[in-house]
Image: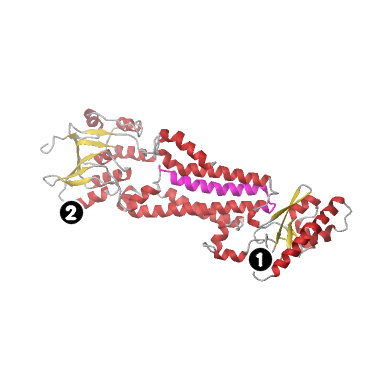
Amino acid sequence: MIVAMLFWVVVVLGPLLGRGLLYMLPLLVAGLGAFFALRALLGEALHSAKALPETGELPYGFAGHSIHAFSDTEGQVWLRARDVRRVLGLQRTDAWMAQAYPDGYRRAHPGSVAWFVRPGTVHRHWGGSTWPEVNRFLHFLERELVPLQTRRAASASVPGQPATGGAPDAAGSKGQVVPGYLARQWRGEQGLLHLALWGAVLAALVSHVLLFEPSPAELTAHYRRYALILLAELLGGTLLSAWWGVGAWRAARRWFGADRSLLAGLIVAMAGMTMLLYAFDHLADRDRHMGLIALAVLAADRDQKPVVGLSGDGQRILLSGEMGFGTTNLIRGLLARHPGIRGIELDSPGGSASEGFALAELVRDRHLDAYVSATCASACVLVFAGGQERLAAPSARFGLHRSGVAWRTGDSGISDTDRRMAAWFAAQGVSAPFIERVMQTPFREMWEPRTGELMGSGLATGEWRGEGG
């Protein structure tokens, strides 16, 4: 059913969302998975008489009731106390019964915290009853489960032959790939305290990823290192979230099987599903953080970079092309090899906002003049605004808009990056009306101011006539 729904989502929404649908697929898969998982869990909780397959219990029918039973490694048959209580109307508490019959009423299953009772204990406690329902149930035990116990005990006594239908062999879990503690959490065998502790660890990891905001200068200078760190945190955080979520889900199912609170079990299950959903949602978030593909491109240093060179007189850097990660490092290296450079000529459609801010600050700190005779748009305008003298030729074309990401179809309004851009323009002497006009232009539109507007706003400080101008 999930596959069918995803198919219709792709067919119907694919032409409308385009590439954006690819980024949303993890979120859609996680959302649909969480919905169907919670629906299944709720149905199981409301029909808790069904057997839980992880416990190895087998259901037996009696007067419209299900009696779940398992046999331990010694062949001893145990009945789920909840089922017996429902049939016979037991008024005593589990604690009282466990104290009265320490060997016959206890938590006997290694994979469950539910209470179980031996058939012999049922006979001892109810053997003198005159109620017809009780006597019918005792006859049922004699007819169905006592012979079963005899067969299981005989089977368990044969070397190398395990008791059939019994509890899972604890020794077999030692062959798991994930050892010890991690394996028990994955199987849902940890208590709520362990779930809470691991949830706190995951929350700290996710918070670090969300709050990890290096400065543009730091990011552009060491972008490969930061990409590797974020890539490891995203992958590790997602895998840990899935591990924790599956463990919480399975722990909730065991909670239901132990006759515990339905509300508490649902809270634990929803916490697990929420963690899973958040893990995939975090991968789909392209606004504040890059996705796995973008980070892998940065780590491999395969991002687009402009062509850089020197003018004929060696006084200006010539920059042409999109400004991807690594652009500022290229310009910094060129300045180190040619200390006589006095300016930078820009011809770029834009690129990374982080690179734009970092290169703009480098241009400002080195007191370089900025020149444009062709195209300068988006992040390129940030660099132009960093020039000591900002000269624009009559042929220059500028394009400005708010920041954004290519895959998002809507407009989320003014972002933190936009506010930083406005503050940068203001610090460089650009007029407030000009900045306000930029902030009013959505990411998918482009405002192209005229030469007079550039001069009057203070963005351009003069006109450039070319090599001799």
Q: Is residue 335 left or right of residue 126?
A: left
Q: Which residue is mark 1?
A: 162
Instruction: Write the start and end of the magenta stretch as one range.
Output: 257-286
Dominant SS in magenta: helix
Question: Within 10 Å of the Cα at label 2, are there few (<14), some (14-19), or many (20+) other Cα atoms?
Answer: few
Question: Within 10 Å of the Cα at label 1, are there few (<14), some (14-19), or many (20+) other Cα atoms?
Answer: some
Q: Nearer the viewer, residue 107 or 40?
A: 40
Q: Residue 425 falls in which quadrant of the image? A: top left
Depicted 5 relative to depicted 44: above or below: above
Q: Amino acid at mark 2?
A: Arg
Q: Quadrant of the N terminus?
A: top right
Q: How many marks?
A: 2
Percent coordinates x, y for residue 380 in the rendering? 26, 40
For discs 2 and 1, the disc positioned in front in the rendered view: 1
Residue 378 visible in this rendered orientation of the protein: yes
Residue at image point 59% right, 65% down: 172
- Calculate the distance from the C-alpha at mark 2 to the C-alpha at mark 1: 77 Å
| SS category of the residue bearing label 1 | loop
Q: Amino acid at mark 1?
A: Pro
Q: Is residue 227 left or right of residue 396?
A: right
Outermost right residue: 130
Q: Which residue is mark 2?
A: 337
- Magenta span contains residue 271: yes
Q: Nearer the viewer, residue 80 or 366?
A: 80
- Which mark is on residue 63? none
| SS category of the residue bearing label 2 | helix
Depicted 277 relative to depicted 174: above or below: above
Q: Nearer the viewer, residue 372 or 73?
A: 73
Q: Quadrant of the C terminus?
A: top left
